[in-house]
Image (cartoon, rainbow, N blue to C red):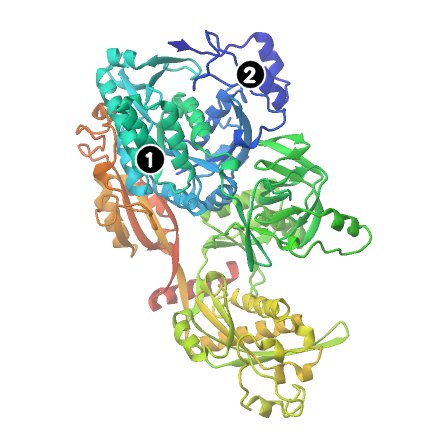
Amino acid sequence: MRLFALGQSPALCRCLTKASPASRLRLLAPRPLLAPRRRRYATQPPEPVLDAPPSDLPHTRNIGIIAHIDAGKTTTTERMLYYSGFTRRIGDVDEGSTVMDYLPAERARGITITSACITFPWHSHTINLIDTPGHADFTFEVERAIRVLDGAVTILDGVAGVEAQTEKVWRQADAYGIPRIVFVNKLDRMGAGFGRTVREIGLKLGGWPAVLQLPMYETDSSSEEVLTGLVDVVSKRVFRWSNGGDGRSVAVHDYKWLEAHRPNLYEEALKARVALVELLSEFDEEIVELYLAVDDHQLVPPADIKRSLRKLTLDGTGRVVPVLCGASFRNMGVQPLLDAVVDYLPSPADRPPAAVSYYNGRERALLAPDDGRMCALAFKVVHDPKRGPMVYVRVYSGTLNRAAHLLNTSLQVREKAQRLLRMYADEAVDIPAIPTGHIGVILGLKHARTGDTLVEEPPAAKHHHHHHKDPVPAAREATLQLRPIAVPPPVFFASIEPASIAEQKPLEEALALLLREDPSLHVSIDEDSGQTLLSGMGELHLEIARDRLVKDLKAKAEMGHIVIGYRETVTGPLGAQVHKLYDREVGGKRVCAGIAASVGSREFFNNDFAEHNTSIIETIPLDSENILTVTILQKKSAAAATPLHNPAAAQHLQAPTLPCPPGQEELHLPPHLLPYDPTLRNSLLSGAIAALSRGPALGFPCHSTHVHLVLDPNTDIPGGSTESTPPAFASATRLSVVAALKAAVEAQTSALMEPLMDVAISIPESELGHVVGDISGARGGNVYSLDDDPSDSSAPVGMKLKIDQRKIYAPPDYNSSDRGGGGDGDGDGSGTGQRPRTVRAKVPLKEMVGYLRHLRSLTKGRGSFVMGVDRFERMAAQRARSVFADMGAGKGVV
């Protein structure tokens, strides 16, 4: 047995109060009290020196903590920081003393709102960790964190199992191919079931759970079963923690001790190892060969099992999922979890090269970490009142040096990285460079946004910059783009009004800062009332945004009632063309352009395209499932063309003109509008997007709408004149599309669409009937599955593997009846009616406003739910009329 602990002298404690973060790490570097040999175990703390240069790529881990809300993400992170030596005390979420939840709103509400980044050591490795929110309203925070991670730790609540938001973040990680391990937390709680949770991993997350540890329970003085340790199936060791300690003192035993003191658990540990080796043999031929050589599952070397687990985890498919266990709040199991992060999750060098594109996606390539070019992705922007804008970046190749001249290829602007920081939650340390594969912060960037690509400006371009006003680097390198971060559409909005006219400009500046920090927020202006509207992902999201505006950014403003963000659409096929002419005098010069537009439902797009396919030169998908098609007619001879300002123009518009074949449009356009892409194309695109951003009926954005533009060079470009500038075509396009949308309303071919939410409700089994009846009855929802429905079994969409539940190894949940888990040996609680159940339904968002309070009333405070936008669905006429009545009555206050 080996015993480790941490001791601190009074002098050391006095030194800690004034130490910087980096100095504190050196002072707190713990040493084992009893260590006969310098062999490191999972329970032995490292010797951190964080102000030294970052370790090389193989010894770097960029990981995130992802989970459902209240699964213990921040609690686990606080223990990681404590055992690594970064902090001298364990932060508590309830007390508001955590390192990672540093915002006042986070400490007041006891939840994580914004993802926080921190760097700490573990043994000889450097770990860059991002703690992400678990609330569904902040799913974009998770999205942009996952985008730059190399691996993730998924934390599950051992009582609730795999919850709805866990499935959502798991699918987000699937989309980026992120390797994951699972930590089943809260196994000290009543009703916890490790075996039940393991089965849910296979059924709900679509991967084969590889059980690496077993929880160990012992009977205390009050005859209750309490969690005291865990069994490591891979290394065949037992870890026991003292009850009530800080987790540093850990007794380490071998299997002989386990066989003598816990024979039943010893037998189960042998079964678990057999199941682990058998599972690995299904995917790894080398394990098969090793087993055939030794002919005993127990004799397969731990190092080979770890190597196989690492290989299968690194492929990022999630087909094999390493599963660990513990109880973070009781300080059990976190050190072995950190060892697993090092053993099974990838370094930046283990990940595939980053996908990049050139020329707006027309050319694609891969960017290897050893590429000499510095390329980084800005994934988060935070406005600090003292430091200014702080841009969080992940460097994918090269080294980002202090004072480097950067080109933002997304905005085509140049900036200078004045200072570089390494973040420790809300504290920071200046560093000279951010090497490949690491995460850091840049100060001094005035324009960078979330999702922007930053490259180091070539030396020739920097030299050229001193002699010319607007130098352009090598054309190809200046268009390099990393994969952007997708921003989900908002579903709630509220009005924001300044306290006085004098506060209008400060409010606009504060909103600009807020939108730069959080791109999932949107700001628009209601043209009828002139009000500023702030849109977001949910009620809590907008409440936090309001608090940030008023309390942090000191904007003197008030927020109106939160309202659902509906959408407008057009029904039926393409309608009649509406032609508009934009003819203005701008800056003393006349600008003139015209274009015709027609609108219809995307539902009829295939029929419309079949009718016009010989004339459509381009089909452009837009946001919100809108689509734009363009037709350019052939240019007639000079004698036949009639300028727009000629009175005979109306007659000329009736003359038949043939469309030009696709690919030949530039033969019929004047030189000042060439090339078609991007000169004219971008103008038509921006005009159509501007028109679709505000529907004709209530001003909601358009959805599932097909816009068809027809440009006749003979009439819409008067005499081929240079007066028809690209901005003029953008304005003409906006006017014609708006007119076509209004014509659709007059023809009664427009409709409202409402957000249809995919809702997952977690409740005790005893309340199942009440909740299902309420959802499918009064709220008009469609319950499509329960968690035990064999036809669906809550399987994730796009699941790659078909998991046979009978083949999943899941250890029995011993004595779970004594801990409130039921007496059937499975720990599912079926004997008491408290088994966690999940109801899944599609429900209109309007019916879910304020649902949490109603759910808690139905379930005596034991129910919870998460939801996300499934799609926008056309509203029935009766529901649409009620919305029109509400909006008409409250138009002035929305």
Which amino acid is tagged 1? Glu
Question: Residue 825 in the image: x percent, y percent?
Answer: 19, 28
Count of picture labels: 2
Residue topped by disc 1: 285
| Spatial CA span between label 2 and label 1 | 42 Å
Which of the two residues, 706 or 518, is positioned nearer the viewer here? 706
Horizontal side of 518 relative to 199 (left or right) equals: right
Residue at the right extreme? 467
| Front of the two marks 2 and 1 | 1
Residue topped by disc 2: 29
Kind of element beneath mark 2 = loop
Compared to residue 322, the image places residue 729 above or below, namely below
Labels 2 and 1 touching (C-beta < 8 A): no
- Residue 502 shows in the view: no
Kind of element beneath mark 1 = helix
Question: Mark 1 packing: few (<14 Cα in 10 Å), some, or many (20+)?
Answer: few
Which of the two residues, 511 or 241, is positioned nearer the viewer here? 241
Question: Residue 317 in the image: x percent, y percent?
Answer: 39, 43
Horizontal side of 712 relative to 146 (left or right) equals: right
Question: Residue 350 in the image: x percent, y percent?
Answer: 49, 37
Horizontal side of 776 relative to 603 (left or right) equals: left
Which amino acid is tagged 2? Ala
Which quadrant, please, contains the N terminus?
Answer: top left
Residue at the image position 32 percent from the left and 43 percent from the top: 206
Compared to residue 785, the image places residue 552 above or below, namely above
